[in-house]
Amino acid sequence: MIRTYYLLTKPGIIMGNLITTVSGFALASRGHFDLLLFLATMAGLGCVIASACVFNNYIDRIADEKMVRTKNRPLVQGLISPKSAIVFALCLGFLGLVILWIYTNPLATAVAFSGFFIYVILYSFWKYQTSLATLVGSIAGAIPPVVGYCAVSSRFDIGAALLFIILVLWQMPHFFSIAMFRAKEYGAASIPLFPTERGHFATKIQMLLYIIAFLVATVLLIAFGYTGTAYLVSVVVLGLAWLALCIKGFKSKNDVAWARQMFRLSLVIITLLSIMISIDTV
């Protein structure tokens, strides 16, 4: 039963978000790493993200029945009752916000709650109404590194803003890739997708523009004196590789396979980006 509740929190999503949180925390720390504050930030935000994921599982339980990828989730299989899931989500969210409030600061707590609200209340419902909900979801996904940054700095400045912008710009091509190779699954659940509504060519144009903007945003971290040369070299190489693969997609004869490549590369990029921000902060 413990494992069932654990799976309900979508541990993969939690891990991915906490990786970016580390980069925000390290960027604001600038070499003065507070271990206790770091652990409290990770624990508190981890609980908030887990709570949001459980709520999302509850909201998606009907649609999840129609998709092969999600039909075995605990709520769909009846392994956990909807009421128990709600109670679990509330407890996780309350615990996480209390930890952040006590051990970090009101700003970090408020930012974390805003991400929770955007993901659960706005994105989770709007995604059934409009494909533009993807942009809303990208805003929620860009919150974790900002929480990490604000937990240390107690302020929202240009560093926090750049992290937020970078994550939003990264997520759009990432989400579009998923939408392209999982279009049939989402279609079965009646979830509107940009590639389905506007076509693959229009989606590729959007991805190209977002990746170019992403490249510019990542370079701004060094321009404003937050990171060093090693970071710059890494992000330029990775960004150009992503851009090249995106351009290659305009000649692709198998968009599903190409989208999977874009998706995998996007994961490599955000992981290495987070690592380089963490170890090459000025």
Image: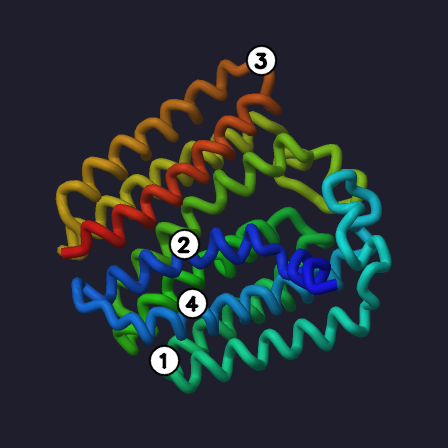
According to the image, label 4 marks what residue?
Answer: 42
Position of residue 262 in the picture relative to residue 77 (left or right) = left
Looking at marks 4 and 1 on the same chain, the residue that comes earlier in the sequence is marked by: 4
According to the image, label 2 marks what residue?
Answer: 19
| Amino acid tagged 1 | Thr
| Amino acid tagged 2 | Ile
SS for callout 1: loop
Q: Disc 4 or disc 1, which is closer to the eye? A: 4
Label 2 – label 3 distance at C-alpha: 34 Å
> Residue placed farthest to the bottom in the image?
102
**Residue at image point 80% right, 64% down:** 80
Where residue 205 sits: x, y (%)?
Answer: 48, 31
Which of the pair 263/172 is nearer the observer?
263
Q: Quadrant of the N terminus?
A: bottom right
According to the image, label 1 marks what residue?
Answer: 104
Q: Disc 2 or disc 3, which is closer to the eye? A: 2
Looking at marks 1 and 3 on the same chain, the residue that comes earlier in the sequence is marked by: 1
Position of residue 199 in the picture relative to residue 152 (left or right) = right
Label 2 – label 1 distance at C-alpha: 18 Å
Looking at marks 4 and 2 on the same chain, the residue that comes earlier in the sequence is marked by: 2
Looking at marks 2 and 3 on the same chain, the residue that comes earlier in the sequence is marked by: 2
Where residue 230 sits: x, y (%)?
Answer: 17, 41
Question: Relative to 24, does residue 135 appear above or below in the rendering?
Answer: above
- Within 10 Å of disc 4 (Cα), the crowding (few <14, some 14-19, many 20+) is many
Query: Quick check: marks 4 and 1 in contact, CB under 8 Å?
Result: no
- The image quadrant that residue 234 belongs to is top left
Label 1 – label 3 distance at C-alpha: 50 Å
Position of residue 38 in the picture relative to residue 51 (left or right) = left
SS for callout 4: helix
According to the image, label 3 marks what residue?
Answer: 253
